[in-house]
Structures are given as C-alpha cells and as structure tokens.
Amino acid sequence: MKFFIPLTIILGAGLMACSSVSTHIISVNSNDAVVGTTSPNAKMDSIIAPYSVQVKSKMGKVIGECKLEMLPQRPNSNLGNWTCDLLLQYGKDSMGLANEPVMSLYNVGGLRAAITVGPITYGTMFQVMPFDNVVSAVKLPIPVLDEMLAYLKAKNGEPIGGISIVNGQLQLPENVKSKGYVWVITSDFLVNGGDNMLFLGKYLERKDSNKLIRNVLIDGVQKTRILEIQSEDRITF
C-alpha cells in the first residue's frame, strides 16, 4: 500500500495565508544566542489544524507488533536482514526477476531508527525509513562483485540478502556463477552513487520501480503482523 501525508496541502495552506502570516523577529548580537519572538496566527492555525489531526491519526495507527527489538547494526542485524529479505522478495515478485540470480543490498545509514518491542505504527516506519527512496535493481557482472566485497570489508558490513560472506569470502549461489551476473535489489539512492557505492553504477542493465522502500517495509509488517526476527550472521570477516 502507498501511505500519503498531505504535507503539500499544509504547505499550500501556508502560502494562501501568507498575507496574514505571523511576524518572526530575530535579534543577533555578537557571541549571543539567537533570540526570537513569534506572534500567533489564528487563521493559519485554523487552516492547518484539520490536516494536523489527520496526520497524527494515521501516523498513530497500529499495523503490527514487534516481539524482539530490531536494531540497525554492523556487520549483521535483524533489522538489516529483514529489510534485505523484503527487498529481495519484492524484486522477485514485482520486478520480473523471479527466475534470475538475485541478491539484495542496503546501507545501515538508511535505517534511521530501531523497531522497539511493542506496537508498530505508521509513525514507527517513518522513523525507521524517513527517505522517499524507491526500489531499484541493477544487473552487475561478477567481476564488479569484487569491488562490492572490498567496499563491505572497508565498511565492516552492510545489510545483504540472498548471499553471504564467510571469513571474508563472498559465497555466491550456483546460478550466479553460471550466468556470469547477478541482479542487485537495492535503492535508487545507492544506485545513483549514494554512500559511495559507486560499484552499483557499473551495471549492465537497470530497472526502477515506483515502490517506496518504506512501503515495502510497511507491507511486510502488515503481512505478518508479528515481528520476531532472530539475528543471523550473514557476514563474517
């Protein structure tokens, strides 16, 4: 499902009310803290209030429950593994890669919060994944995987799925070796060179979806309702 918050409407409302917007006075003296005063704007507040209530209501809606804390960590984490497993399955199911050699890759820096034990809400998932990045897939020739391995060693690991690294050696499925390439399911941000994953730009082919990664995670929660993901060591150096 795609979850939309009418922030553009709120911003638009602000623009419409700009003729009566509150005045913000700031005085700055050398070596002093910034001091500001803001006068209230009742008209602006009345316009925004209904949307604010709607946003809070949706963000607070419970969509599942976490039974075991999920943390973003290196070299392995249950949150990273779960994210990559969902990306891998999405690539197979929705990007025409069911019969292709595939793996998934993400970055710990893209997971901005833990999922703590207790109810999981839409707000929880926005905290974990605040970025509007979409799922992308790139077809990499096997030689480029050496660069990926070097990158992962330098970073002390990033979330992966569909492959493993044992004692610093990349373990590839047989169909990857026979085909000579692997599809990497990841985010458009990383494919475009984010986090210096420049090796992802050396693809033979690229597929972009219109699916937000955050919504992939939300779908994953709603499908199982209960998250109790055990830790699994997919990377050892």
Image (tube, rainbow, N blue to C red):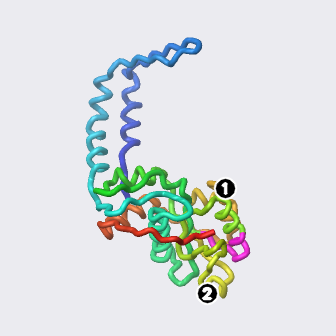
Q: What element carries label 1?
A: helix
Looking at the image, which is closer to me, 33 or 122?
33
Q: Is residue 22 left or right of residue 142?
A: left
Q: Which mark is residue 196?
A: 1
Looking at the image, which is closer to me, 106 or 206?
106
Percent coordinates x, y for residue 234 in the rendering? 54, 72
Percent coordinates x, y for residue 163 in the rendering? 57, 76
Q: In this view, does 120 lie to the left or right of 137?
A: left
Q: In which quarter of the image is residue 138?
A: bottom right
Residue 124 magenta-highlighted: no
On screen, residue 234 above or below 172: above
What span is colored magenta in the figure? 138-146
Q: Which amino acid does label 2 sit on?
A: Glu
- The residue singled out by tag 2 in the image is 174
Label located before the other in sequence (1 or 2): 2
Q: What element carries label 2?
A: helix
Circle 1 packing at 10 Å, graded few (<14), some (14-19), many (20+), is: few
Quadrant showing the C terminus? bottom right
Looking at the image, which is closer to me, 99 or 160?
160
